[in-house]
Amino acid sequence: MTKNKVNDSALGILFEGVKLYCMHFPKYALYMLFPVFGQLLGLLWVFFSSYLFVTHLDYLIQEIPMLNGFIQLISCMLLIALPGLIIWMKAFWDYLVAYGALNSMTDAAMSTGKIYDFPAYNAVVTRRVGTFILLWLIFSLFSLVSVIPFFWVIGLIFFVYFVLIFQVFTFEEDVSASGCFKRSLMLIKGNFARTLAVLTILFAVTYYFLEQGVSVIFDALKITQLLLGMFEGFASLIPVDGVNTILAAAGAPQITPLDIAHSIIDQIVFFLVVGFTLPLRSITWTMWYKSLSDRDGVPAKVTKSGRKKLDPEILKRAKEKDN
């Protein structure tokens, strides 16, 4: 696949993205395995270790009298949960890095038809880690403001204009964090409607339809029932009496541990689908970036020294692997 074959329409871009995603799905899925499951494993460790500690607290205090104190209890709980927190933080960082590395991975797949070496793609981000962290901080502040209902429409407009910031970071190495936002805005300017169309289709597919499909599969394979048995006991420890009192006064149904367990499972399914389709979104926006960049007169993958083809570190590693 070459970039001049990419259709500029929303459906065309999405079709090409899905095709590339399916062609290299084993590699993309393998790359996302730890960032996705690592976060789930870390959180499950934290919650279930805390659950087991609380349910056996009376016995532990009897056997270990020194635990009979608030500071000692909190310290012990934090110590038990620490491995899970470490796993979660590492997986979460890898997930953030994927926003840049997947773009480089897609560039390699489009240019050579192969995906060579994960550390080489990660290095595209880690060698500019300061700019990358600042980029995420600015984006996080923007996202927090957009959560306020009054700013939803404005937030959506700016989200469309800033949707290519990670592609700009990956392919235009001399651009600062704030420059990534400016460059994305300039690329989208004049292409807002088509970009919104791509965003809408991509959002509907990866955030809704696929999530609904996986939920049906979980139900059919009895995975949902298995997880309900695991989470209902934990959910029974969550204090909801105050909330239920308010709901009862309003005549609304009360919240039960089973409701909480269902909600947790829904969130897990949603996170799995969104996590493993991150490569699809990165592929689509990389193709869109390349299309807009070429029409803008500034080809993708350029620096002050001129045009580049593929990251030399990736080519070096690929050559070593072939040998």
Image (tube, rainbow, N blue to C red):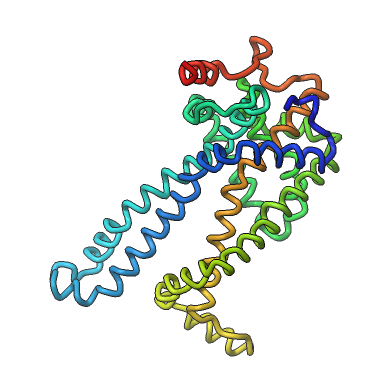
Residue at the (30%, 74%) spot, across then down: 55
Vertical arrangement, residue 199 with respect to residue 320, above or below: below
Measuring from the top left, give residue 92's x and y in whole percent.
47, 46
Residue at the (74%, 20%) spot, across then down: 299
| 211 sits left or right of 88 in the view | right
Q: Quadrant of the N terminus?
A: top right
Measuring from the top left, give residue 241's x and y in whole percent.
47, 83
Measuring from the top left, give residue 85's x and y in whole percent.
37, 52
Identify the image quadrant of residue 15: top right
How many numbered markers are drawn? 0
Say whether residue 4 is visible.
yes
Identify the image quadrant of residue 198: top right
In terms of depth relative to the viewer, which is nearer, 88 or 165? 88
In terms of depth relative to the viewer, which is nearer, 85 or 137? 85
Say whether residue 129 is visible.
no
| 238 sits left or right of 102 in the view | left
| 51 sits left or right of 28 in the view | left
Residue at the (63%, 34%) spot, across then down: 166
Measuring from the top left, give residue 31's x and y in whole percent.
51, 39
